[in-house]
Image: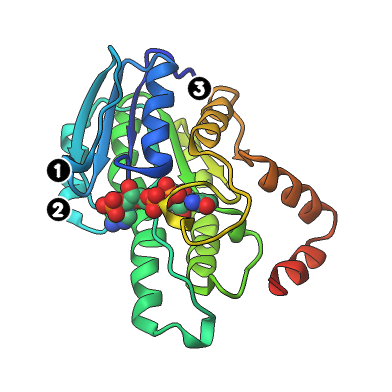
């Protein structure tokens, strides 16, 4: 899908990858960008000529989803980016915490797609980009709730892809490795800059790729997973 002159919306655009996606979209010549966030005062707009419209959107709150879909009725691409992470092993994670993570990473993503699919359809079709993670493919025990929510989100996204194809809506799945944002600020591991990841995701959208592994870590792990997914499962399980 052509990004130049398109109209896009990014959820969780006030920091991290979402903020980088807004800047990358502006650089790529988007006509208009809805920068969505739970708190609009937290959105820092990049220095650009492109029209950027701050939009209140909490992906777990139906009333803000409905309002946002009414306001952003001209969009063609949506970056379903907002997400949350909590550390902890599966038997030690309280059930309520698991439910809270699913509320954002699974139901939130699904609600965004549900509320905006008819908008995209009315605009002749478009693209939904779901930000998943390498941990959708295999679980690391210390991220138990996150793994589960993102694996479920991947499955949901595949169903969405099939259901929305006849409406000329493409679903792109992004599977980043570690990104240098607040989400992993406590972990001393190699991380890719969110600007790089955002560029790679836009490149995939431009080139009509269905799945994108937008950094070196994700590309290497995906290659290994294609060759021997049980070896990746065992390797991640030991981390
Ligand atoms: N960082 C990584 O290593 C990594 C790797 C793979 C995939 N990802 C995925 O990439 C996406 C962006 O993550 P990030 O690294 O940029 O993390 P981040 O810096 O923690 O940013 C998360 C963003 O999501 C927003 N958000 C959380 N709950 C929300 C809700 N209910 N409604 C609307 N917005 C909400 C946050 O808004 P507030 O400021 O209001 O909290 C924030 O803008 C996530 O889906 C994440 O799972 C990240």
Question: Element at badge 1?
Answer: helix
Q: Residue at x 27, y 34 (%)?
A: 35
Q: Position of residue 114 (x, y in %)?
A: 33, 48
Around disc 1, counting alpha carbons within 10 Å, would you say few (fewer than 14), some (14 to 19), or many (20 or more)?
Answer: some
Q: Which residue is mark 3?
A: 1
Q: Which residue is mark 2?
A: 63
Dot 3 lies on which element? loop
Q: Quadrant of residue 200?
A: top right
> Relative to 162, is 11 on the left or the right?
left
Closest to the observer, 90 or 41: 41
What residue is disc 1 on? 67
Residue in front for this viewpoint, 6 or 234: 234
Whole-percent x, y for residue 180 in the image: 50, 46
In this rendering, position of residue 77 left or right of residue 230: left
Q: CA distance from mark 3 to mark 1?
A: 26 Å
Coloring scheme used: rainbow
Some atom of ligand 1 lies within 8 Å of the CB belonging to the residue at label 3: no
Identify the image quadrant of the C terminus.
bottom right
Q: CA distance from mark 1 to mark 2?
A: 6 Å
Q: Nearer the viewer, residue 232 or 167?
A: 232
Which residue is at a point 46% across and 39% down the rendered structure image?
129
Q: Position of residue 62 (x, y in %)?
A: 19, 55
């Amino acid at each position: 899908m052509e990004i130049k002159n398109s109209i896009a919306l990014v959820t969780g655009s006030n920091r991290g990858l979402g903020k980088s996606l807004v800047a990358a979209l502006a650089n790529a010549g988007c006509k208009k960008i809805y920068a969505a966030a739970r708190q609009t005062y937290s959105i820092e707009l990049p220095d650009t000529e492109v029209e950027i419209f701050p939009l209140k959107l909490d992906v777990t709150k139906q009333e803000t989803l409905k309002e946002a879909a009414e306001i952003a009725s001209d969009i063609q691409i949506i970056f379903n980016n907002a997400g949350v992470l909590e550390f902890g092993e599966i038997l030690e994670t309280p059930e309520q915490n698991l439910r809270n993570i699913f509320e954002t990473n699974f139901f939130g993503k699904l609600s965004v797609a549900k509320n905006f699919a008819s908008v995209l359809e009315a605009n002749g079709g478009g693209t939904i980009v779901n930000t998943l993670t390498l941990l959708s493919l295999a679980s690391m025990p210390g991220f138990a709730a996150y793994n589960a929510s993102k694996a479920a989100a991947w499955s949901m996204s595949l169903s969405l892809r099939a259901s929305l194809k006849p409406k000329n809506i493409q679903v792109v799945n992004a599977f980043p490795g570690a990104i240098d944002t607040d989400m992993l600020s406590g972990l001393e591991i190699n991380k890719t800059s969110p600007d790089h990841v955002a560029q790679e995701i836009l490149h995939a959208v431009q080139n009509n790729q269905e799945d994108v592994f937008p950094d070196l870590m994700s590309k290497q792990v995906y290659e290994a997973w294609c060759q021997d997914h049980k070896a990746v499962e065992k390797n991640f399980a030991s981390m």
